[in-house]
Image: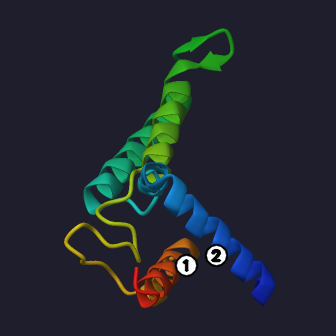
Amino acid sequence: MPLSEHEQRMLDEIESALYAEDPKFVSSVSKQRVGRPNARRQWQAALLLLVGLALLISGLMINVSIGDLKIVSLVGFFVMFAGGLLLLLSPRNGVPSGRKDRAGRGKSASSGSLSSRMEDRFNRRFHQDGH
C-alpha cells in the first residue's frame, strides 16, 4: 500500500532529521543488511546441503543409534541446516544498491530499495537548496 503525499513528506522529514542528527548511526545501520550471497558462498551452501542430505539418507541405512535416535541422520540434518543458514544469512557484497560510495559511484536510484530512493531524493533536494 503506497504512502499518501502527507505521509511521504513526514517520512522524508524524519529521515532527513535522522541523517542530520546521527550520520554515523545511519551509515552503520545501512551496512548491516542481509543480501544475496556471492557465487562462492552459494557453492559452499549447496555442498553443505548435499553432504547433509547424503548423511541424512545414509543414517537411515546405517544402524548407529542411541535409543531410537539415529545419530548419523541427526548430524546430516544439522549439516543441512547450516548450509541453509549459510545461504540465507550471508552478508551483502559491495555497496548496497542505490547508495554511493566515497568516490561517487553507485547504481541508479530507480533500481534501488525504497530507502535508497528516498536518500537520493533527499540529497537532490538538499543540493538544490544550495547547501
Q: Is residue 31 visible?
A: yes
Residue appearing at x 48%, y 49% in the figure: 25
In the picture, the disc for residue 118 is 1
Dot placed on the residue nearer the N-terminal end, 2 or 1 = 2
Q: Name the amino acid type tagged 1.
A: Met
Residue 91 appears at what percent x and percent y?
Answer: 39, 52
Q: Are marks 2 and 1 in contact (CB under 8 Å)?
A: yes
Dividing the picture into quarters, in which one does residue 95 lie?
Answer: bottom left
Viewer-proximal residue, 95 or 19? 19
Eye-nearest disc, 2 or 1 = 2
Query: 112 left or right of 13?
Result: left
Viewer-proximal residue, 119 or 63? 119
Viewer-proximal residue, 103 or 56? 103
Residue appearing at x 42%, y 50% in the figure: 24
Q: Is residue 4 visible?
A: no
Q: Name the amino acid type tagged 2.
A: Asp
Query: 130 left or right of 122?
Result: left
In the picture, the disc for residue 67 is none
Dividing the picture into quarters, in which one does residue 92 lie?
Answer: bottom left
Residue appearing at x 56%, y 26% in the figure: 74
Relative to 94, residue 129 above or below = below
Helix, strand or loop at mark 2: helix
Number of marks drawn: 2
Mark 2–mark 1 distance (CA, rounded to whole Å): 7 Å
Residue appearing at x 51%, y 79% in the figure: 122
Query: 47 left or right of 86?
Result: left
Quarter of the image for the N terminus: give it.
Answer: bottom right
Residue position for label 2: 12
Quarter of the image for the C terminus: give it.
Answer: bottom left
Residue 116 appears at what percent x and percent y?
Answer: 49, 75
